[in-house]
Amino acid sequence: MQVKKVLTYAAIAFVAFYLFTRPADAATAVKGAMDTVVNAADSLALFFTRLT
């Protein structure tokens, strides 16, 4: 349980550090992740549409 808490805080600290030191790269990474989620949702919607 303690290790999980330490790893969580370390991940948050890394994200904050990355955000403040390289904001353009952080924005690009977030945009890429969001594009992946949107593409996956579109693919699922198409799949279920084609089932009917």
Image (tube, rainbow, N blue to C red):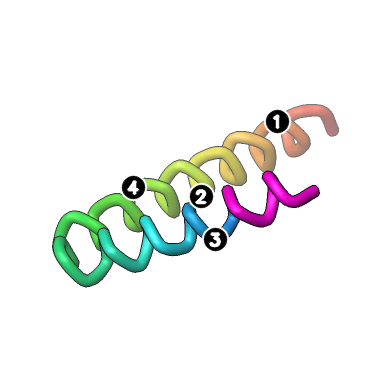
**Disc 3 secondary structure class:** helix
- Residue 3, picture quadrant: top right
User: Which disc number belongs to residue 32?
Assistant: 4
| Residue occupied by mark 2 | 38
Front disc: 4 or 2: 4
Q: Are marks 4 and 1 in contact (CB under 8 Å)?
A: no
In the depicted structure, whether residue 37 falls above or below residue 9: above
User: Which disc number belongs to residue 47?
Assistant: 1
x 41%, y 63%: residue:
13
Q: Gap between marks 3 and 2, in whole Å?
A: 28 Å
**Which residue is nearer to you in this view: 14 or 3?**
3
**Disc 4 secondary structure class:** helix
| Residue occupied by mark 3 | 9
Tag 2: amino acid: Val
Which residue extends farthest front? 2
Q: Are marks 3 and 1 in contact (CB under 8 Å)?
A: no
The answer to whether residue 22 is magenta is no
x 54%, y 60%: residue:
9
**Disc 1 secondary structure class:** helix
| Residue 31 x %, y % | 33, 56
Provide the residue span drawn in magenta.
Answer: 1-7
Q: Gap between marks 3 and 1, in whole Å?
A: 39 Å
**Disc 2 secondary structure class:** helix
Q: Gap between marks 2 and 1, in whole Å?
A: 14 Å
